[in-house]
Amino acid sequence: MSAIETVSTAVRLIAYHNDPALKREVLSRVETHRAAGEIVPGPGFWDGNRGSLVGVSVHSRDAEDFEVATGIAKGGLAIAERIWSLALLRLWLHREAWEGFHPTDIESLRAFPGEWLEKIAPGCNTDGLTRRMTISVLTLVLDEAEAHPDLEGLGELLRTLIDGHEDSSAKAAASWREWRKSASALARAHREGTLQSALANLVATAAWPDTSSAGALPDVLEQYVNLCHYDARDEVAWTGTEEETKRGLDAQRERILLDPASRETTALRDFDDKLKNGYPVFAKRRTALEEARSLHTVRRLMRLRGIFLGLLSDAVNK
Amino acid sequence: MGTNVKYLADKDFEANAKSGGLVIVDFMAPWCAPCNQMAPVLEELAAEYAGDVTIFKMDVDQDGETARRLGIRALPTFLFLKDGVEVARELGSFTKTKFAEMVEARLT
């Protein structure tokens, strides 16, 4: 299905105001800032030199200015700003750790500030982006949820939610509220910090109607990328002996933590130092976990980037 | 600039804090990334809870007196007021769903 549909609102956005010269101007501005390393994470930032995607595109921190200046939906900008922020904050800080093993993907993510704008053809309409992106991400999440038999209820809820987004205007506000409550209840039914709880929380975050989901979708994207923790944890499993040692050490740490007398001493810090330096098996596992997490972060970000660029490419002219 | 969340100056704080229903004041600054992250969420929620909830922003760089007086030490801080009386204060950025839950809990 195309990302672009006929919109019922009185104002219809036309990308780059159907002017290829404007597109070139915006892209050139972004590229200049990118080459100078002046594109920072976060939405809505511009200090006169450095900025987030909105700042370096239109030299303003206001998404409304972006929409007016470029004719591109601010919902699209919100998606792009969150993908870029996640790439910067989750990966660039650990540059040396991953640069060697995923060079192509990393180059692609670096080029993202100009790439997403490049994909939008002058004259097309980008109003449907938030909705289409939400549906696409929820479809990915549905596949993950269905792989877990104990998340049966969530799969059903996800399908209902995807249908809801397909025809958002036909659903009453009460339905969305009900879906949010159901997803939150499912999240609470599982222990915090589990994949089940994370998936259910993501679904609750996505349960807003099309007209008001622009504020929620960036959080959905972030929660989707955060699932990398569970991908990594599944891959780097404990051996039986390690598991037993870890349980014993966790119990010792818990005792220190709960002992009021230890609060006045450095007992907890000393114990953590001992854990860090005295058990190479844990240090090795920690490194393996970090590497796996980096890899899965890249994979998940590349998946989001691919979907988003695909939706932008599908944009129908005029 | 969004239209549902208005900026509030120090001199207007008292009068607006006592406006009917639940009032939320977002103490923020333009350079604060979590504040900017919350901006579209607040815009949408202000529209969705119009009539029950009024949301204002206070830029602490421009109007810092109220923030100092109220002991605001982190950005963003959200002050929840009923009839001018503080009923809660929340720090940091939240998902839209989480923030909506906080709003609903204070509406009842």
Image (cartoon, helix red, strand yellow):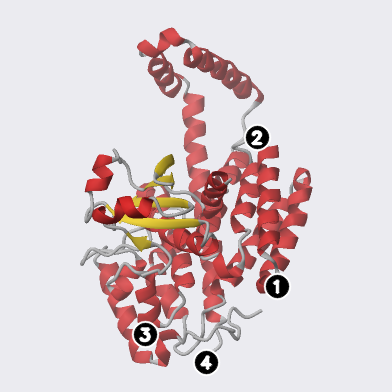
Are labels 4 and 3 on one chain?
Answer: yes
Question: Front-most of A34 and A68?
Answer: A68
- The answer to whether residue A300 shows anywhere in this view is no
Where A217 sits versus A193, above or below? Answer: below
Please report contact status of discs 2 and 1: CB closer than 8 Å, yes or no: no
Type of amino acid at the residue the image marks with label 4 = Lys
> Which badge, 1 or 4, is on the more N-terminal residue?
1
Instruction: Report in which chain the residue with disc 4 lies.
Output: A
Q: Nearer the viewer, mark 4 or mark 3?
A: 4
Instruction: Report in which chain the residue with disc 3 lies.
Output: A
Give the structural element (helix, strand or loop) at label 3. Answer: helix
- The answer to whether residue A281 shows anywhere in this view is yes
> Which badge, 2 or 3, is on the more N-terminal residue?
3
Location of mark 1 (residue) = A170
Disc marking residue A132:
none
Disc marking residue A318:
4
Disc marking residue A23:
3
Q: Nearer the viewer, mark 1 or mark 4?
A: 1
Q: What is the quadrant of residue B3 in the picture? A: bottom left
Instruction: Report in which chain the residue with disc 1 lies.
Output: A
